[in-house]
Image (spheres, rainbow, N blue to C red):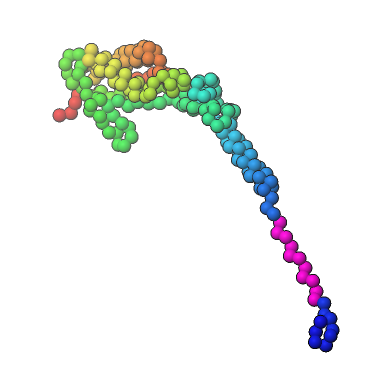
Amino acid sequence: MDENGTYHWAPETPPKPKKPKPSFKRAGKTVLAVLLALIVITMAGTCWYTVDDKQQAVVTTFGKVTDVVDAGIHFKLPFGIQQAHKVNTNVYQKIELGYSSGGGNAFNESESTMITGDYNIVNVDFFVEYKISDPVQYLFSSDEPELILRNLIQSQVRNVVGSSSVDAVLTDGKENIQMQVKELVTRILQEYDIGLTLVDVKIQDAEPPTA
């Protein structure tokens, strides 16, 4: 009531709208959906793998070999339960002894210098071709199968050259030396069983050492 005796009614103040409470249930469902999506994406990315026509893949389950597969698209269990180890089995690979064709034909005298059966010194360079014949043995029977093969070839080359005359090494005996080296290395590879097969051995060059 004012001073003139008149009543004035003040309008009621409308109640303030209540802020919606955060929905923890909805947030939990969103997080769960994101996690499920990530799991599906991860599984899709780790369940499938491709092997090309030059390869085979050794499949291990919990670290144990369970399969060997050829070229194509293949399925495996995710999260590291199964792993596919790809190996180039359908490829000819090379070893160069005494020289290197890369980087300007560099020579390695420690590999090429040899003594013949008649006590002459020669420099002999060998070119070797080999293949991976057993991917399981190649992966798991030894740590460095290529190094084993290289050392084996070098040893047998020196053995054969050391029992040959200098004339045979430099002229008409090269083919026989190549054949002997291949036979010896092949026999020992079968005993070692490291998953490698020797394809060919050739004398790339043979000459007396330069002064």
Residue at image coords 22%, 15%: 162
17 or 135, nearer to the observer: 17
Magenta part, dominant SS: loop
Whether residue 26 is situated above or below residue 69 in the rendered picture: below
In the drawing, does residue 154 fall left or right of residue 53? Answer: left
76 or 211, nearer to the observer: 76
Quarter occupied by the C terminus:
top left
Can residue 174 be seen from the camera position used here? no
Residue 120 in the image, given as x and y percentages of width and height = 17, 18
In the drawing, does residue 64 fall left or right of residue 179? Answer: right
Whether residue 164 is situated above or below residue 49 in the rendered picture: above
Residue 127 in the image, given as x and y percentages of width and height = 33, 24
Residue 95, located in which quarter of the rendered image? top left
Whether residue 143 is situated above or below residue 12 in the rendered picture: above
Residue at image coords 29%, 20%: 154
| Magenta span of residues | 10-20
In the drawing, does residue 134 fall left or right of residue 156? Answer: right
Residue 81, located in which quarter of the rendered image? top right
Instruction: Pick out the residue farthest to the bottom.
Output: 4
Residue 132, located in which quarter of the rendered image? top left
Residue 155 in the image, given as x and y percentages of width and height = 28, 18
Residue at image coords 55%, 32%: 79
Can residue 201 be seen from the camera position used here? yes
Instruction: Pick out the residue farthest to the right.
Output: 6
Magenta segment: does it hold 77?
no
89 or 209, nearer to the observer: 89
Residue at image coords 27%, 33%: 106
38 or 53, nearer to the observer: 38
In the drawing, does residue 164 fall left or right of residue 32? Answer: left
Residue 1 in the image, given as x and y percentages of width and height = 81, 82
